[in-house]
Amino acid sequence: MSTDISVVHGVPAKQTKTQVADVNTNTANAASESGAYETIKIDRRERVGLITLYRPKSLNALNVQMSREVLAALAAFDRDDDIGAIVITGNARAFAAGADIEEMAEKSYVDWQASDFFAEWDRIRSISKPIIAAVGGYALGGGCELAMACDFIIAADDAQFGQPEIKLGVLPGIGGSQRLTRAVGKSLAMDLILTGRNLRADEALAAGLVARVVPSAGLLQTALETAHTIAGYNLPAVRLAKEAVNRAFESPLSEGVLHERRLFQSAFSTEGQKEGMHAFLAKRAPVFRHR
């Protein structure tokens, strides 16, 4: 969650250097689709769907509208046969600096029980295609939780991660205590959640929270290139691989290995398996049709 971060977390008011390099884009379809959203922008880069969080005046603080628009865009890309992977990013100053405190400050326990918009974020788990979080600047509170809900994180060298909810008299509410502990271990998760301190990008990499750290100017390009690589593989196999890794977080080892074996066997029912192996034997590049 977030509040006036310039006061609580020491975020400077001035703009920082740009986080993304210019990347040529196909905007024909995305222009009409983006018109349906107010707090995000969406785009297509060949077989990659791009979601950009866009509430710049509030450092992309997550409110109900943004939450629903992100989830709607994810679901739309997941249904789109021409998309093989998804990237979520923010801007140079912040991926997302938390949840919108103005929107929740006066809520009561009864209000949360009656309508818990945080629960909607659980729907991210139903997205079958890989989701990469490209994080530059601040990913705090709900922003950190959104990044962790993605399949993996590529961070800019100026990124900072944190769960500062304790400073507001509450605790993480969108899965932060669970995903952070699984990612970095109990001791560091306790430290971050109970002190509210931030974790630098290099620390996040060493702790296993992020997959890569890259210069801020190349963040989006790196994320898109990575997503493009994934999207070029056999989509049924990619989906099965994602499911297998996610199962590792939720199952005992013996059960996870058995589930992985079943997924591996089911990959042999796809055209992509035949194409991939035949291409290897023929010493040529595979041409996957994602069936």
Image (cartoon, grey):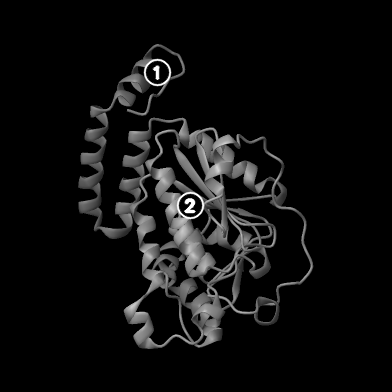
Q: Residues within 10 Å of mark 1 (few under 14, many from 20)?
A: few
Which amino acid, mark 1?
Phe
| Whether residue 73 is situated above or below residue 159 in the rendered picture | above
Residue 16: percent from left, percent from top = 77, 61
Give whichever of 164, 67 is nearer the camera. Answer: 67
Distance in Å between CA atoms under marks 1 and 2:
28 Å
Q: Nearer the viewer, residue 104 or 155?
A: 104
Q: Secondary structure at mark 2?
A: strand
What kind of residue is marked 2? Answer: Phe
In the rendered image, which residue does mark 2 sit on? 152
Can residue 151 be seen here? The reply is no
Q: Nearer the viewer, mark 1 or mark 2?
A: 2
Q: Residue at x 34, y 35 (%)?
A: 237
Rendered position, 36 above or below 184: above
- The residue labelled by disc 1 is 280
Q: Are marks 1 and 2 in contact (CB under 8 Å)?
A: no
Q: Is residue 190 left or right of residue 276?
A: right
Question: Relative to 126, is 77 above or below?
Answer: above
- In this rendering, would 176 be left or right of 60? left
